[in-house]
Each structure stands twice: as C-alpha cells, then as structure tokens.
Amino acid sequence: MLPPRWRHTISKLFIIPQRYVLGIMGLLAVCNAYTMRVCLNLAVTQMVNNTKDVESHYDPDACPDDSEILNGTVSSKLYAIFDWSESTQGLILSGFYYGYAITHVPGGYLAERYGGKWTLGIGLLSTAIFTLLTPIVVKAGGATWLFILRVLQGMGEGPTMPALMIVLARWVPPHERSRQGALVFGGAQIGNIFGSFMSGFLMAGDGDWANVFYFFGCFGILWFLAWSILCYSTPNTHPYISEEELKYLNETVTSADTKSVRDPVPWKAIVRSVPVWALLFAAVGHDWGYYTMVTDLPKYMTDVLKFNIATTGTLTAIPYLAMWISSFIFGWVCDICVTRGWHSIRVGRIIHTTIAATGPAICIILASYSGCDRFAAVAYFIASMALMGGFYSGMKVNALDLAPNYAGSLTAMINGTSTISGIITPYLIGLLTPDSTLAQWRVAFWVCFAVLVGTNVVYIFWADGKQQWWDDVRQYGYPSEWKHGPLKTADLDKEKSKKAIKEKSTSS
C-alpha cells in the first residue's frame, strides 16, 4: 500500500475515477471471454465439409446460395478438412459449458477468499493459452481432443462472472449498479460483435480458420497484462486511488472493505430463498435464448439463409451491436426510474427482465416464419437481441441487490446452474436440425420460445429487489422460522458481548 502522499500524487495522473477504469477493464474482460468462447461458432462452419450432406437430401424450402446466384456453383471451403455430423458439431460447441459450469462455485469461493483480481485474470489467461493451441490440438486429435480442449477453456472462464460480481460489489455504489452493470456485461456484446466480425474477416477470401484462434488468443494475453497493472480487488488495496474516491466508496458501498465479510456462505438459507429460485429460473431462460443465438445463429445464417462467411460474420455481429446499445438505454432508464421513485428496484428488475424475455421469444418465431426473406429474418434477429439488452438492468444485476456481501457465491450458483442451457441447447439443436432445414430450425425456435416465456412467468411472481436477511444477519436478524434452530452467528456475537461486559464490570 502506497503512503497517502504518494497515492495523492499518482492519483492526479488518472482523470477517470478508478471505479470507471475498473468498469472499462471489466468490459474488456467480458469481451475477451466471449470472443474466445464464440470464435469456434463461426469457425466451425469453415472447418466442416458439409457439401455431401447438402447433396444427400432435398429441401423444398431451401434458400438460394450466394455463390449459386452469382456463379452457378456451390461455394468451396479450402480448409474444410473435417467430416462431422450436426450432432457432433453441437456436442463440440457444448463442450465449453461443461467446464464452465464446473468452476463457477470454486471460482466464486476463490474470489471471495483471495480477491477477484487474480481469480479472474488467471482464469482468462488460461483460456487465452488454450485458444492459441486450438488449431494444433484439433488437427492432431480431431473432434475428441477438441471437445476436451473446449472443456478446459470453459474451466478457465468459469470464475469470470463470480469474480466480476465480487469486484463490482466492492467497487460500485448501489445507485450506479444498473449503468455499471450495463457497461461491464455489455462487454459480452462487444465480444460477440468483435468476434463475429473479425472471424468473418479473417476467414473471408479462402482465409484459414486457424488464424481466428491465433488472433483472439493473443488478444486475451494482452488484456491480462493490462488488467494486472491497472485493476485491484478492492478500493482499500488500490495503490493510487484518490483519497476522495476511497472515502466515497467506503461510505456508499456496503462491502467495499472485505474485512467485514468473514462468515461462511449461508448456503442453506440461499437454497431456501424464493427470490434466489426466481432469479435462477430467469437465468436459465436468458441463457437458453442467448446461447441459442450466440452458438447457432452463425450456422442458421450459413446453412439456412445461405450467406457467405464474410457476410455471415458481419450480419451475426449486428444483432449484438443492437443489444449492446440497448443495454445502456435500458440501464439508464432503470436508474432514472428508481432514483426518481417512479418504481421500486424490484419492479424495475421485473419490467426489464420481461421485456428481455418475451420480446426475443416473439421475434425469433417471426424470423423463422419469414422464410428466405433475408432482410426480414435479419431484422427480426436484430430486434430480438436489442430487446434482450434489458436483461442487464434486469436479472443480471439482481444478485447485487439480493446479496452484495455474497454476490460472488450467489452468481456462481446461478450462472453455474443456468449453464445447463449452454450444455443442452447446442446439442439439442444439432439433434433437431440433422439436415439443417428451415422447418427443422422452426421447431428449435419454438422450444426456445417456450423456455423464455415460461421462466419469465416464474420471475414475475417471486422476484425481489431488496438485500436478503441472510446476506447480513447482524443487521436484519433471523426470521421466525430460523430462530428455533441451532445457535447462530448473531447469537454467538451477543453471547460474546454479554461476556465481555460482565468481565469488564467484574474487573472494575
């Protein structure tokens, strides 16, 4: 820790407050996480030679290919050296989420125990290294080795969201959470935009798909170096934060000083909390719709709408750009409404989560029934993702409302469990679309519609926007149904206080 005089001098070099520097670096962290996660989604369309599958069946609803329209020939894939079925591709794409789910809870524990800086940084660094190794591994071991590597990549990224939640809980005042949440978690859309566009660019004109993995792996390593220098787990451990900002954060952020958080995670109370279950249902619905778009939209663009790879990269990026922009609008609107007392935090979370669930559900169905009208289909996908931007000021920041002291563990449990959507959706869509026809994709989109709407109904009825009693027992105490159990932490504190007072009176 630097002396106050040195800290004051160095802090003058930083015009932007450190919590906003952290927000920008957090955005880039999520951006990196998503580029390394989704780059395979577009690359796999150029890794697999599926011309035989196309010729083996007739689809009366098939859209014309760009290359067929222009040249009268089917487009070639120079580096398509693998012969994988749709279900095999789906299994490979889902491999990431097996590892991602495994390290969520351990990642949350490590972040709460040792701080979010290195938990997040080392995890993403490992994913960057695995991304660099992808072309070598897949050429050496095929689908099996690639699946294993994707599991390892997922394990590296598992601590990302829990660690970020821990860091944000230490740094962000309650009235700034919707905007900071939109900023940081909007990095997912920046990652999808940047990842989709650059992947299409790098593979355009017979480009080698291996370049995609080399590029994003190096990008992840550069981010790690910047994160290590600029960011710290808490305001009180930051060497050059200004004294004014440090004082402000210690006064406004409940958990700015991690020394106040020493109790074990109250898992029993968390599991029995109705608002937590509502949040879990909303997260499952969000992830189902989101992973359907992120993982399989490139395949739909290429296999059904028959866009070439460069166009697919660009058009896949546009919906995420719309989602990123809309997330800031939703976040600003939610903060304004809460600040001015137009509605409570709970109502705000429900409104924005509902917009982000039912809106996309309707739009993807409309897209599937637009047939080969490419303009209409792309417009519906863009509208779908724009409306999904409401999630970031809705259920995505709800964990900070419910449990600022245990935000890492709660986020780990929610994200880790909801990741089952990422495991199921790619493989299920591979099974539902063996021939990748428009009619088969329509069924997959109806399944997505049902999950989005159904989980949102649960959230509407049981969501909450207040800090839960189990997050700070010393302040809120225990509810009546918990008071008849074994001696609790608060009771122990009372006994210790009584004993200290008695000893003091005796000694005097």
Image (spheres, rainbow, N blue to C red):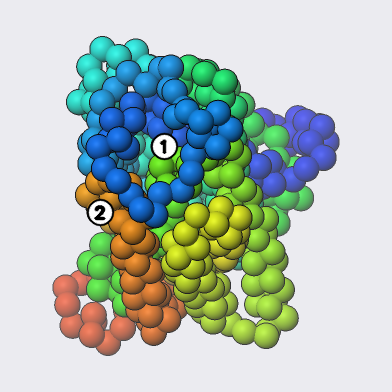
Circle 1: residue type: Asn
> Which corner quadrant holds the C terminus?
bottom left
Q: Residue at 79% across / 36% down in the picture?
A: 14
Residue 198 sits above or below residue 268 on the image: above
Q: Is residue 108 visible?
A: yes
The amino acid marked with disc number 2 is Leu
Q: Is residue 123 left or right of residue 314?
A: left
Q: Where is the N terminus found, in terms of image quarters?
A: top right
Give the mark toward the camera: 2 or 1: 2
Residue shown at 16% from the left, 73% from the top: 486
Which image quadrant is residue 328 in? bottom right
Q: Position of residue 367 (x, y in %)?
A: 49, 62
Along the line of sight, the residue nearer the viewer: 96 or 416: 96
> What residue is pinned by disc 1?
41
Residue 471 in sight here: no
Which residue is found at the position 64% from the left and 31% from the top? 230
- Identify which residue is drawn at 31% across, 83% down: 479
* Disc 1 packing (10 Å; few <14; some 14–19; many ≥20): many
Q: Is residue 136 above or below residue 209?
A: above
Image coordinates for residue 302, horizontal then vertical, percent: 45, 40
Q: Residue extending furthest front?
A: 72
Q: CA distance from mark 2 to mark 1?
A: 18 Å
Q: Earlier in the sequence, mark 2 or mark 1?
A: 1
- Give yes or no for contact between labels 2 and 1 (Cβ–Cβ under 8 Å): no
- Up/down of 22 relative to 137, above or below: below
Which residue is denoted by mark 2 in the rendering?
Answer: 432
Residue 360 point in image, percent of width and height = 49, 66
In the rendered structure, the answer to whether residue 277 lies left or right of residue 206 reads: left
Residue 274: horizontal and vertical position, in percent?
31, 77
SS for dot 2: helix
Helix, strand or loop at mark 1 = helix
Describe residue 393's horizontal placement relative to residue 506 as left or right.
right
